[in-house]
């Protein structure tokens, strides 16, 4: 305990980590590329160079390096990792809005995983992370934060190819091409294939992904685009281990036949039109078709062949206006989903319609002071089929936000805000396919208060934020009773510190620390902490560039103890705290780059996640020390 407290204090006092200065364009500020617009929120920007230097091979691996994001992997290949912001544990993926070019990849109809392997890091221009509630601007599920992945728009001719190999018989191939077609058109095509046996027995994964883009510049600054993505993602899921099984063999498979085989297709059409010098229209239409074949077993309940199908249509038009130093965004979000789950227990389906209208105004009050105010009205209609019966469940609500940004000089930025948020219950939360008919859950509602300060100098950046989030009817899952529940009242309070320091032309240091105090404040579990949420997390990185073509980066992450999933009484022994270090090195020459990475450098044995259930406490062991090495070629003109 002494070493833990001392080390966290060092991280905190050396100032901490991953928040670079505000970029000239922040799309997540108003759901549009708006130069100079400053939002009253804490944000982290990860650009394409930082992504490449991180050595991350997936989005979940990259986000582990970001202060304020806790990632836990329950399968082992990163495809279905839980991304937690502001302390939601097992329901984190439903309380963080994860977007690709503004399109949410979180299913709103059901509690399926995020399909993170649909994101190609090599095709990402930058990632914008908004820490904290964004319910007014982004709506359903934007409770703990927003992660917006902005893909690369082809600006010139490019050819790229990558190949890598690693532990557990892993290999990966990737290729891409982009081209300008005259003065107005562009296209890009990327292909990706990856295979690995992964850490545990019967845990193999196979990934195939193909994506394409066509864009056209119109006269007057307008632009239209079409994007297509095809994904095949197959992974074996060996199951959680009980304590004695973990000691006996942490790599063994309990359910050797369990698997998740996913096929996903996404078509997105977007346009940006100038209506007049002060106003423009932006709109996207996204069509998504997901199919999954799977077998998932539980102790005492062997799994059987099951299917899950989801078709969705999403339309998101908005107009953005500029007048007298004001920026106003007026928009509509409309999502229609047809969902069906077929298991040995029967058929469960949902025809879901979620709609919302919103407005946000950013106004300059003085040379150094700006205000942002917003409002959203949203409603949901569900036609739920469970076995032979159907039930209609509907709800509506209105939320608002207010924030201020004060810049006393070019280096300092201070902000304060209040933002209301909400989350609609999903079909598998409203119902229990194995044990009952639809009964319905209440909509989760909350409000977040936050203050923050940031300093951005030439050699030093420091950021700090404090927040308080109160929720009513938080939606959660209790594995001990195998049922979904509303927690009457709950709260999160916390603070985060981060810094980046340029120590010399060849050496950079950064660190981050976050403290979260969670509590269920009413009901049967009043006074308990929210399961699977660490009270303290910290990260540290050191980048050393001895020569211009060489880069070495060390990442160190700390995660505190946390109660097992579904342990609302906090009765079981918590998951152990752990420290994990990763080391990556790059060497670049001309258009080539050679990279190598060691994950879990000190061979720590730990579990990122686990749960209490009627069968006992189960644990998902994380991988021990492992390696990969790769080579890439990228040519642009």
Image: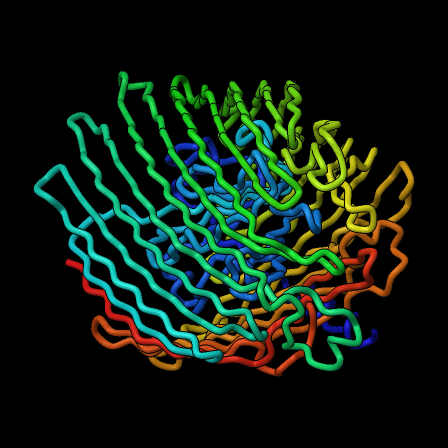
Does 506 sit above or below residue 395? below
In the rendered image, the residue lying farthest to the left is 182
Q: Is residue 449 visible?
A: yes
User: As drawn, is 55 to the left or to the right of 189?
Assistant: right
> Observer-nearest residue: 432 or 157?
432
**How many numbered marks are there?**
0
Q: Residue at x 34, y 26 (%)?
A: 282
**Image quadrant in which the C terminus is located:** bottom left
Residue 488 sits in quarter:
top right
Q: Is residue 548 visible?
A: no
> Observer-nearest residue: 57 or 408?
57
Residue 323, x across and y down, in percent? 39, 17
Does 601 sit above or below residue 444? below
Q: Residue at x 90, y 46 (%)?
A: 527
Q: Residue at x 56, y 22 (%)?
A: 374
Q: Residue at x 54, y 64 (%)?
A: 236
Residue 167, x across and y down, in percent? 47, 80
Residue 581, x across and y down, in percent? 59, 75
User: As drawn, is 373 to the left or to the right of 495?
Assistant: left
User: As drawn, is 69 to the left or to the right of 474?
Assistant: left
**Image quadrant in which the N terminus is located:** bottom right
Residue 39, x across and y down, in percent? 52, 35
Q: How is the image coloured?
A: rainbow
Does 248 sit above or below residue 184? below
């Amino acid at each position: 305990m002494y070493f833990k407290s001392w080390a966290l204090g060092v991280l905190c006092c050396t100032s901490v980590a991953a928040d670079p200065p505000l970029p000239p364009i922040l799309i997540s500020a108003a759901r549009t590329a708006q130069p100079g617009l400053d939002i009253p929120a804490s944000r982290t920007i990860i650009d394409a160079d930082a992504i490449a230097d991180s050595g991350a091979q997936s989005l979940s691996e990259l986000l582990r390096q970001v202060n304020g994001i806790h990632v836990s992997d329950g399968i082992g290949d990163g495809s279905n990792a839980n991304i937690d912001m502001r302390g939601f544990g097992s329901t984190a993926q439903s309380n963080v809005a994860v977007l690709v070019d503004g399109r949410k990849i979180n299913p709103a109809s059901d509690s399926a995983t995020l399909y993170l392997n649909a994101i190609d890091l090599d095709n990402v221009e930058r990632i914008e992370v908004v820490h904290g509630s964004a319910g007014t601007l982004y709506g359903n599920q934007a409770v703990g934060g927003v992660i917006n992945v902005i893909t690369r728009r082809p600006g010139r001719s490019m050819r790229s190819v990558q190949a890598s190999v690693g532990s557990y018989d892993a290999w990966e191939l990737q290729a891409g091409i982009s081209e300008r077609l005259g003065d107005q058109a562009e296209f890009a095509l990327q292909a990706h294939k990856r295979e690995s046996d992964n850490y545990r027995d019967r845990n193999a994964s196979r990934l195939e992904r193909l994506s394409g883009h066509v864009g056209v510049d119109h006269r007057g600054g307008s632009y239209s685009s079409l994007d297509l993505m095809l994904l095949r993602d197959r992974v074996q899921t060996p199951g959680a281990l009980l304590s004695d099984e973990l000691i006996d063999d942490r790599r063994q498979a309990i359910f050797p036949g369990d698997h998740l085989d996913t096929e996903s297709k996404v078509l997105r059409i977007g346009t940006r039109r100038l209506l007049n010098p002060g106003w423009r229209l932006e709109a996207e239409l996204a069509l998504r078709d997901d199919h999954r074949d799977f077998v998932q077993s539980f102790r005492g309940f062997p799994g059987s062949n099951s299917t899950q199908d989801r078709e969705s249509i999403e339309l998101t038009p908005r107009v953005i206006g500029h007048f007298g130093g004001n920026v106003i965004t007026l928009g509509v979000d409309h999502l229609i989903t047809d969902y069906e789950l077929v298991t040995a227990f029967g058929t469960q389906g949902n025809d879901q319609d979620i709609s919302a209208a919103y407005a946000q105004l950013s106004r300059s009050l003085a040379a150094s002071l700006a205000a942002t105010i917003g409002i959203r009205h949203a409603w949901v209609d569900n036609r739920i089929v469970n076995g032979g019966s159907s039930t209609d469940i509907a709800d509506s609500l209105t939320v608002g936000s207010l924030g201020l940004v004060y810049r006393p000089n070019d280096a300092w930025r201070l902000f304060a805000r209040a933002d209301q948020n909400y989350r609609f219950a999903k079909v598998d939360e409203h119902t229990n396919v194995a044990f009952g008919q639809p009964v319905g859950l209440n909509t989760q509602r909350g409000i977040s208060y936050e203050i923050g300060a940031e300093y951005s100098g030439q050699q030093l950046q420091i950021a700090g934020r404090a927040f308080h989030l109160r929720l009513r009817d938080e939606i959660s899952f209790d594995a001990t009773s195998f049922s979904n529940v509303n927690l009457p009242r709950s709260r999160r309070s916390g603070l985060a510190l981060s810094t980046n320091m340029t120590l010399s032309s060849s050496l950079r240091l950064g660190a981050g620390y976050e403290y979260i105090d969670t509590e269920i404040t009413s009901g049967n579990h009043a006074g308990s902490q929210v399961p699977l949420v660490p009270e303290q997390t910290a990260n540290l990185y050191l980048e050393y560039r001895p020569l211009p073509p060489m880069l070495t980066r060390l990442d160190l992450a700390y995660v505190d103890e946390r109660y097992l999933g579904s342990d609302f009484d906090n009765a079981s022994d918590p998951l152990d705290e752990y420290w994990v270090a990763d080391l990556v090195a790059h060497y670049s020459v001309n258009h080539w780059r050679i990279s190598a990475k060691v994950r879990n450098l000190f061979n720590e044995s730990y579990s990122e996640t686990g749960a209490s259930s009627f069968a006992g406490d189960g644990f998902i062991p994380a991988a021990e020390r492992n390696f990969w090495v790769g080579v890439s070629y990228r040519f642009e003109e």
